C-alpha cells in the first residue's frame, strides 16, 4: 500500500507518471467527462484547518471519477484530542477506501498513515504540501510545454509550499531558487535533499537573500503568504522581516519578460503580492488553482488502482 505524504518518498518516474495521468484526465474532462474509475469508492477528508481549494477540489475530483467524499471537520473528530490518531485511522479504514488529511503537524498525517489500512494523502501539513506542488508542475508544463531546464524562483518564507515545490522542481529537472530573509530559509536538511535529487535529474538549487538576484533569470516566480495559519502571533514580526520580498511590478521588471507568476492561495494582497501582478497577464494563479482538481484525480487513481 502506498501513501502520498511527501514527494521525497517517490521516484521521479512515479511523479512523472502522475503528471502524465493528470494531463490525460484534464483532457478527458474538457472533452466530456472522466470515466467512473472510482465508482463505489469513498474518500474520507479529515480537516484540522479551514479549506477552500483542498476541500472542494478533492470532493469534485471524487465526483468526476464516480466516487464520493465525506468531509470531517475539527468539531467532528478532534484529531488527537477527542480520539487518538490511531483510533481515527483504524475506524476510517473500515468505512472508506482512502483518506486525505489537512493538518497542522506533519507528524499527525504520518501517524494516520502508520495506523491506516487504506492509502493516506497529505492535503497539507506544516512541513509539506505535495498535492499543491503537483498542481504547480502540471501548470508549468501546460504553459511552457516542459519543466526540465526551467528556472523556478520562490520568493518569501521557506515553508511547506517552498519545500514541496523545491522537491517537485528537482524531480522534474528544473532549477530551484529560494530567496528568503536570514532565518527564514528552508532547513539545510531539506535543501540537501532537494539538491541530491536535482543532481540526478539535471537541475540545481540556489539560495539568495536578495529577491532581485533570484528573479533575474527566472521563468517562474512563485510566492506564498508570509504568515501561515498558526503563525498569527508572529504576524507583525514576519511582515517586517519580509519587507522587500513582495512580488510587485518592480520585481517583475527585474525578471525576463516571459516570466510567469504563481501563488498557491489564499493571497494576502498588498503583502506578499500586489493586485496588478496577481491579476496581470503574467499570472497563472487561477489556472494553478484549477489544476489542483486534475492533479489530485491522478494522485487518487495512482493510489487506488
Image (spheres, grey):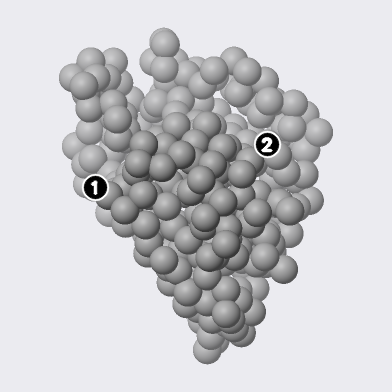
Q: Is residue 10 left or right of residue 189?
A: right
Q: Position of residue 93 (x, y in %)?
A: 58, 58
Q: Is residue 114 left or right of residue 305?
A: left
Q: What's the residue at 66%, 29% (across, down)?
A: 194
Who is closer to the viewer here, 290 or 47?
Answer: 47
Q: Position of residue 141 (x, y in %)?
A: 60, 57
Q: Nearer the viewer, mark 1 or mark 2?
A: 2
Image quadrant holding the C terminus, namely bottom right
Name the residue tied to disc 2.
8
- For residue 130, which quarter of the picture? top right
Whole-number angstrom distance, CA of label 1 to CA of label 2: 35 Å
Name the residue tied to disc 1.
276
Q: What's the residue at 24%, 47% (across, down)?
A: 276
Q: Secondary structure at mark 1?
A: helix
Vertical order, 180 against 61 (above or below): above
Q: Position of residue 70 (x, y in %)?
A: 41, 66
Amino acid at each position: 500500500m502506498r501513501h502520498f505524504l511527501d514527494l521525497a518518498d517517490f521516484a521521479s518516474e512515479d511523479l512523472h507518471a502522475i503528471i502524465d495521468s493528470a494531463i490525460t484526465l484534464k483532457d478527458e474532462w474538457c472533452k466530456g467527462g472522466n470515466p467512473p474509475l472510482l465508482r463505489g469508492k469513498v474518500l474520507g477528508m479529515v480537516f484540522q484547518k479551514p479549506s477552500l481549494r483542498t476541500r472542494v477540489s478533492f470532493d469534485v475530483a471524487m465526483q468526476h471519477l464516480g466516487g464520493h467524499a465525506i468531509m470531517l471537520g475539527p468539531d467532528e473528530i478532534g484529531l488527537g484530542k477527542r480520539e487518538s490518531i490511531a483510533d481515527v485511522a483504524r475506524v476510517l479504514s473500515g468505512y472508506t477506501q482512502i483518506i486525505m488529511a489537512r493538518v497542522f503537524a506533519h507528524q499527525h498525517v504520518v501517524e494516520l498513515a502508520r495506523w491506516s489500512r487504506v492509502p493516506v494523502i497529505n492535503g497539507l501539513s506544516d512541513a509539506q504540501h505535495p498535492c499543491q506542488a503537483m498542481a504547480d508542475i502540471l501548470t508549468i508544463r501546460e504553459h511552457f510545454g516542459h519543466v526540465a531546464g526551467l528556472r523556478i524562483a520562490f520568493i518569501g518564507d521557506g515553508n511547506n509550499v517552498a519545500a514541496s515545490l523545491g522537491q517537485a522542481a528537482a524531480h522534474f529537472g528544473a532549477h530551484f531558487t529560494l530567496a528568503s530573509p536570514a532565518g527564514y530559509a528552508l532547513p539545510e536538511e531539506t535543501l540537501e535533499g532537494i539538491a541530491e535529487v536535482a543532481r540526478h535529474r539535471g537541475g540545481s538549487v540556489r539560495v539568495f537573500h536578495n529577491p532581485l538576484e533570484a528573479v533575474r533569470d527566472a521563468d517562474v516566480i512563485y510566492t506564498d503568504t508570509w504568515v501561515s495559519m498558526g503563525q498569527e502571533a508572529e504576524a507583525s514580526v514576519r511582515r517586517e522581516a519580509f519587507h522587500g520580498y513582495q512580488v510587485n511590478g518592480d520585481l517583475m521588471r527585474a525578471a525576463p519578460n516571459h516570466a510567469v507568476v504563481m501563488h498557491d492561495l489564499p493571497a494576502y494582497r498588498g503583502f506578499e503580492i500586489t493586485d496588478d501582478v496577481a491579476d496581470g497577464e503574467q499570472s497563472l494563479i487561477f489556472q494553478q488553482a484549477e489544476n489542483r482538481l486534475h492533479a489530485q484525480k491522478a494522485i487518487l487513481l495512482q493510489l487506488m488502482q
